[in-house]
């Protein structure tokens, strides 16, 4: 039991630190932007002000003043001692959850201190008690969700726009061989946005045409792409979104790629083999990303973003002739559309500025509940995205509204569930709501980093219902195809947050019977959260609906 939970906690630390690497880069970009050193701007001044107000900051002064206060407040909290309480968590988490966490001794300090505390606990012969290690994991998960995920996504909203619904081309058909195609790949969207800004200028389009291309396109890819498509609308330059991580080899083998720009996470060690065979430039743009044999790199620096974007675009243009002359592209690939760009703010706007219409249809049973589908993608049990699509289809068929995040979001986008026409796959109640509001039954809600954002929305729903405890809400979390270490800390946070959490495949903890019992049964008496492991998608949805109906009965709705 102790060994299994120790290894799980180490995976949690890896996930938390990687999420936070992204957050630190986002904050550096915010600071450099308000100091006039980047091509970016404060795109959402009202969000800057409202987020600062939620954190208890003085919002008098200029946008620059408020942004720097936010930057300094967040940095101070990240470095808060393990024994002190995080101010970010105090300001943002639901009061009911905070009391639970205090009573269990898992109210966190700063994330860096929590990572040190957790890692130190995993040394041989330090903490071998599975229950203690599980509580430390939850403590780390809470710090990660609020200090990393929420701070990160809200700051990216401030810089690059709050996600709002719009159409987006998706699937491999967005790749056309006669264009210079650049794919930003990974999780950090900064250079992707900078390249789109440059590529929309006529001078860069003319440079592409001068080498025989029809033009220059930036194609969104994987989670970097999700961050981009949620916020910016498509045009003939920012053309569309390919898909999720499991599609990477097909994307690279399409014969349509001129530059594959690799930031933190989701690039593969075998990518150089594809780059050599299919004649594209493979360029790491994060100091943590390294490929054997690849020496040309452009490590992102906020103050050099425009210059670096120009360098990357020129590399792609210079590559076009060789790629087009020596690689036979795959033609006729599928392309469809998805509606993307849902967020807490845009959902509220669609409902007329209040949650009441959503709460009303939940109370009267038109919608039975809400599922946050936050998943990776894996070939471990099924074909590409099969499990995720089955779970999503079954949930909407049973009148459960789905909010999709992560690589699972790419699955449902490409799979046709994020368009209004997908209402015909939904149950009669959810279908009626979709028709009335003009929305899909699966709302494209972002990346895996939006786990914190959806928790914040759930907290808002709880407050709107008069403070109903999180575990009593008709809400579930689902990770049908988790894979990354990031996903493990997401699931641990969901348990700490009090959510029924379904995961597949089976986590590597089954050698510890007492640990399994703690996660799947006893945790309910601690935080209200419960872990459900199920490899069959229909049985998984059966169990999620049973939980939702039980909570509806408890609430008398």
Image (cartoon, rainbow, N blue to C red):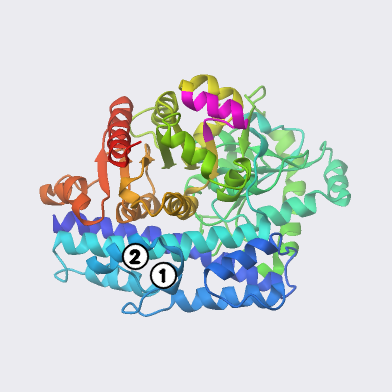
* In the image: residue 273, left or right of residue 83: right
Q: Is residue 435 magenta?
A: yes
Helix, strand or loop: magenta stretch: helix
Q: Is label 1 in a helix, a strand or a loop? A: helix
Q: Start and end of the magenta stretch?
A: 429-442
Q: Is residue 269 or residue 343 the one in the foreground? A: 343
Image marks 1 and 2: residues in contact by CB distance under 8 Å: yes
Q: Is residue 397 magenta?
A: no
Q: Label 1 to label 2, Cα distance in Å? A: 7 Å
- Say which quadrant the C terminus sits in: top left
* Residue indicated by mark 2: 98
Q: Is residue 234 or residue 403 the one in the foreground? A: 403
Q: Residues within 10 Å of mark 1 (few under 14, many from 20)?
A: some
Q: Is residue 275 or residue 553 the one in the foreground? A: 553
Q: Earlier in the sequence, mark 1 or mark 2?
A: 1
Residue 97 sits in quarter: bottom left
* Residue indicated by mark 1: 90
* In the image: residue 167, left or right of residue 381: right
- Say which quadrant the N terminus sits in: bottom left
Residue 58 sits in quarter: bottom right
- Seen in the picture, residue 104 relative to 380 is either above or below; the reply is below
**Position in image of residue 553 (x %, y %):** 29, 36
Residue 288 appearing in the image: no
């Amino acid at each position: 039991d102790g060994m299994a939970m120790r290894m799980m906690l180490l995976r949690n630390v890896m996930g938390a630190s990687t999420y936070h690497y992204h957050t630190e880069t986002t904050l550096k970009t915010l600071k450099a932007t308000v100091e006039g050193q980047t091509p970016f701007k404060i795109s959402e001044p009202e969000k800057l002000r409202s987020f600062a107000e939620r954190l208890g900051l003085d919002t008098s002064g200029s946008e620059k003043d408020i942004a720097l206060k936010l930057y300094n407040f967040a940095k101070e909290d990240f470095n808060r001692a393990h024994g002190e309480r995080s101010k970010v968590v105090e300001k943002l988490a639901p009061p009911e959850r905070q009391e639970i966490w205090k009573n269990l001794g898992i109210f966190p300090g700063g994330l860096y201190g929590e990572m040190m505390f957790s890692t130190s606990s995993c040394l041989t012969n330090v903490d071998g008690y599975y229950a203690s290690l599980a509580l430390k994991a939850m403590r780390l998960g809470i710090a990660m969700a609020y200090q990393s995920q929420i701070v990160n996504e809200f700051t990216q909203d401030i810089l690059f726009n709050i996600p709002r619904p719009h159409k987006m081309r998706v699937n491999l058909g967005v790749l056309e061989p006669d264009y210079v195609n650049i794919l930003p790949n990974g999780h950090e969207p900064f250079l992707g946005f900078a390249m789109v800004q440059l590529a929309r200028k006529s001078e860069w389009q003319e440079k592409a045409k001068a080498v025989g291309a029809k033009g220059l396109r930036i194609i969104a890819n994987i989670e970097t792409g999700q961050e981009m498509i949620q916020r910016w609308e498509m045009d003939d330059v920012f053309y569309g979104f390919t898909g999720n991580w499991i599609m990477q080899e097909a994307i690279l083998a399409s014969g349509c790629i001129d530059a594959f720009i690799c930031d933190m996470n989701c690039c593969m060690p075998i990518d150089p083999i594809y780059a050599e065979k299919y004649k594209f430039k493979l360029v790491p743009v994060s100091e943590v990303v390294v490929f054997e044999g690849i020496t040309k790199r452009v490590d992102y620096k906020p103050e050099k973003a425009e210059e670096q974007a120009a360098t990357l675009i020129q590399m792609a243009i210079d590559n076009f002739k060789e790629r087009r002359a020596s690689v036979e592209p795959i033609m006729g690939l599928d392309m469809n559309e998805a509606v993307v760009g849902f967020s807490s703010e845009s959902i509220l706007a669609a409902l007329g500025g209040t949650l009441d219409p959503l709460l009303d249809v939940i109370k009267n049973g038109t919608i039975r509940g809400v599922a946050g589908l936050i998943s990776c993608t894996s070939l471990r049990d099924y074909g590409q995205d099969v499990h995720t699509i089955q779970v999503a289809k079954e949930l909407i068929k049973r009148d459960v509204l789905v909010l999709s995040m992560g690589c699972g979001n790419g699955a449902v986008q490409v799979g046709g569930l994020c368009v209004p026409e997908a209402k015909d796959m939904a149950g009669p109640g959810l279908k009626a709501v979709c028709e009335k509001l003009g929305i899909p039954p699966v709302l494209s809600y972002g990346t895996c980093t939006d786990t914190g954002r959806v928790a914040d929305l759930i907290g808002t729903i709880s407050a709107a219902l008069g403070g109903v405890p999180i575990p009593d809400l008709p809400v579930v979390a689902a990770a049908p195809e988790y894979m990354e270490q990031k996903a493990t800390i997401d699931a641990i946070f969901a348990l700490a947050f009090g959510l029924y959490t379904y995961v597949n495949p089976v986590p590597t903890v089954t050698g510890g019977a007492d640990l399994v019992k703690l996660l799947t049964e006893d945790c309910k008496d601690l935080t209200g959260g419960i872990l459900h492991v199920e490899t069959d998608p229909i049985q998984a949805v059966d169990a999620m609906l049973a939980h939702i109906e039980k909570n509806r009965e408890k609430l008398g709705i």
